[in-house]
Amino acid sequence: MDGSSAEPDRDQRSFARRVRDRGRRARRRLSRRFRRWRSERKRPPWPPEAVAARTAFERRVRAGAVAGSAPGPSLGLEVFAFSSEHDLPEQVACLRSFLEHVGEPREFTIVSDGSHSRESVEVLRSVHGCVSVVSWDRLANPDLPGVVWTYADHSWQGKKLAMSISLPRDRPVLYCDSDILFFPAASELREPGAGSRCLLDVRARPYLDDRLLHDKRESKPGINSGFYFHSRGLDYGPALERIDGLTEWRTFTEQTVLHLALRQAGARPFDRARYVMANADRSKLDDRYVRPDTVLRHYTTPMRHKFWLAPGR
């Protein structure tokens, strides 16, 4: 066989590989959408009051009727959040509560999972001049291990992990999920100190991928990946070694990697009573955990309706 016939064969094989890769990606997207649809069907419906509050707020946000925030004092740190188009109302409310009760950071960077529309990007930027929006793959360090890129291709948690590993390591950084609300006592975050700090997860059980733990002692206390601080970065190397070779990604794989990295860094936990992660009041309309000395509450997916019923939101 001469070279002229071999070249078309290579082209055909390359084309076939591209078609197979596209098919795999499409199947993964459909699988993720199905899992999300199935999980949402299992959740109890939101109270009408919460649905109405979120709908009204989103309508005002998209109409440009939510005034820009008047922030507190300037801060000597940068803040990052990982977010999606679906979470636009929560992200705007989170931003406004941070600016009001904590202050104006050097920059508040919203890291998009890639789903934000141009309109939504402009909405986020309009909240305050310190806000910028960047796609996760633009922020991600190109030298990340291949396993992280594989994980990011599989799920949004992998994209979030890629972001976390790529955060600045030469200056103070605060990270917060989009479903966190800050309250007046959050003014104490203006001086977070040195080293690393972490948010403890709910007491009931650690929400971790136990395949990555050498023994049960590594699971306690469980750390939530929705809010943390570090003044000079984290060493993810040992934790990433534990996901090397994985082909199945679980819901809390990303959180477990961060849990291990923060443990290794000797991260000091924020006061659990005032930095709230709780789900015991899921069926209650009032928010018994938000008190005058509460700094923040992380309203995770099962508790998201309470985000819209929170006092002073």
Image: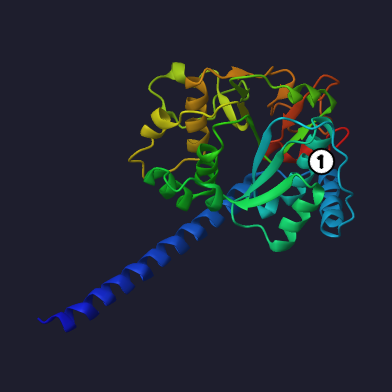
Q: Is residue 115 visible?
A: yes
The answer to whether residue 33 is above or below residue 102 is below
Residue 260, given in percent of the width and then of the height, sits at: 47, 26
Which residue is situated farthest in the left direction here?
1
Q: Is residue 155 left or right of residue 48?
A: left
- Residue at horizontal 71 percent and vertical 41 percent from the top: 108
Percent position of residue 208, x then y = 50, 30
The residue depicted at 32 percent of the width and 68 percent of the height is 17
Give residue 243's position: percent from left, percent from top: 38, 36
Quadrant holding the C terminus: top right
On the image, numbered disc 1 is attached to which residue? Answer: 96
- At 52% from the left edge and 24% from the top edge, which residue is drawn? 262
User: Where residue 21 sits: x, y (%)?
Assistant: 38, 64
Q: The N terminus lies in which quarter of the figure?
A: bottom left
Q: In this image, 85 relative to 54: left or right?
A: left
Near mark 1 (Cα within 10 A), the count class, few <14, some 14-19 or many ≥20, is many
Q: Amino acid at mark 1?
A: Arg
Q: Is residue 107 above or below residue 63?
A: above
